[in-house]
Amino acid sequence: MALTVLSLELLNRLHAGGLLTKATSIVEIGAQQLANDFLRSQERVEALGRLFSVTKKFDLPAPQASLIVEGGAEHVPETAPLARQFWEWLGFKYAAVDIDGSPNSIPLDLNFDAVPRRVRKKFDIVTNFGTTEHVANQLNAFKVIHDLTAVGGIMIHNLPAQGFINHGLVNYNPKFFWMLARSNDYRLVHFDYIGREVPTDFPSNLVESILPYAPDIGERKARYKFDDGGLIAVLQKVRDMKFVPPLDVATGTKTTNRAMIKRYWTVFAHD
């Protein structure tokens, strides 16, 4: 994904709430780009810069011709400017978890790799603007985010929650973040659910995949519409503790299984 005009609105909200009052250190989970609606927001960008006492103008390049993919979503072109330029203009010390070889990149395989000791708990802001939905190993991906974040730092997630057929490997349920916060004693500082106004048609490549097994899909597809929607969850890491996976059990649940109590010590109530 990319930084959009909604990203600017969120940063303003976090600044107003006292969570983003100065430029410190930031790491992106996946190096992001600047979407066209961001590039059309010169006045909003400059207003945000003033909040960070930035006097130098940030010259946004003109929006580029973009591909409208099936469903009407705008696909950010590969040549779109990197978000890195924006963060560094604001004064942040920037890094990204990516395998693109860019300067200050941390080359991690989110399915398997652990965070190197030199960058553990080093970043005040960790952004996940549409990356972890492309990762099979959700446990490791969110552990990486936890381990990168400094105590007191914030983790910003902007991820697909419904629709987005064939976009990534997973979509997220709000409960995932509630349980994630409970397991790690994160403070939930902002939460939102945003949908698109135009429904998405049944994808043609999905029709082609189904057709050999259910030939009537050609008739049924016209009745199916999908509403794309996304979650924004901003979590603050308030304790210096090892990552605990989210667990979908009711708060107050007890168990006598010692291994489970040790593994999910923040979740299970016990005497």
Image (cartoon, grey):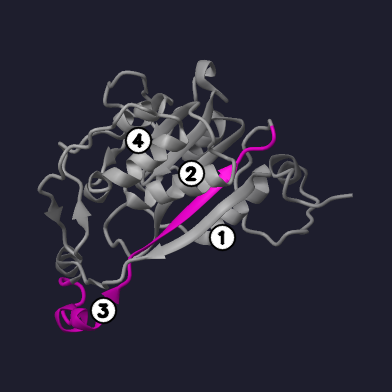
Which residue is identified by label 4? 30
Q: How many residues crowd mark 4 within 10 Å: few (<14), some (14–19), many (20+)?
A: many
CA gap, disc 2 to disc 3? 32 Å
Which of discs 1 and 2 lies nearer the camera? The answer is 2
Residue at 76% in and 51% down = 268
Which residue is identified by label 1? 175
CA gap, disc 3 to disc 1? 26 Å
Q: Nearer the viewer, residue 187 or 136?
A: 187
Tell me, yes or no, whether the highlighted magenta stretch contains residue 244. no
CA gap, disc 4 to disc 3? 33 Å
Q: How many residues crowd mark 3 within 10 Å: few (<14), some (14–19), many (20+)?
A: few
Which residue is identified by label 2? 156
Asked if residue 1 shows in the view, the reply is no
CA gap, disc 1 to disc 2? 16 Å
Residue 103, given in percent of the width and then of the height, sits at 31, 18
Asked if residue 189 shows in the view, the reply is yes
Q: Are marks 4 and 3 in contact (CB under 8 Å)?
A: no
Numbered range of the magenta stretch: 211-239
Residue 200, given in percent of the width and then of the height, sits at 24, 70
Q: Earlier in the sequence, mark 3 or mark 1?
A: 1
Q: Are marks 4 and 1 in contact (CB under 8 Å)?
A: no
Name which residue type carries label 3: Tyr
Which of discs 4 and 3 lies nearer the camera? The answer is 4
Disc 3 element: loop
Residue 52's label in the rendered image is: none
Residue 48 falls left or right of residue 71: right
Which of discs 2 and 3 lies nearer the camera? The answer is 2
Residue 224's label in the rendered image is: 3
Disc 4 element: loop
21, above or below 219, in the image: above
Name which residue type carries label 2: Ile
Residue at 58% in and 46% down = 17
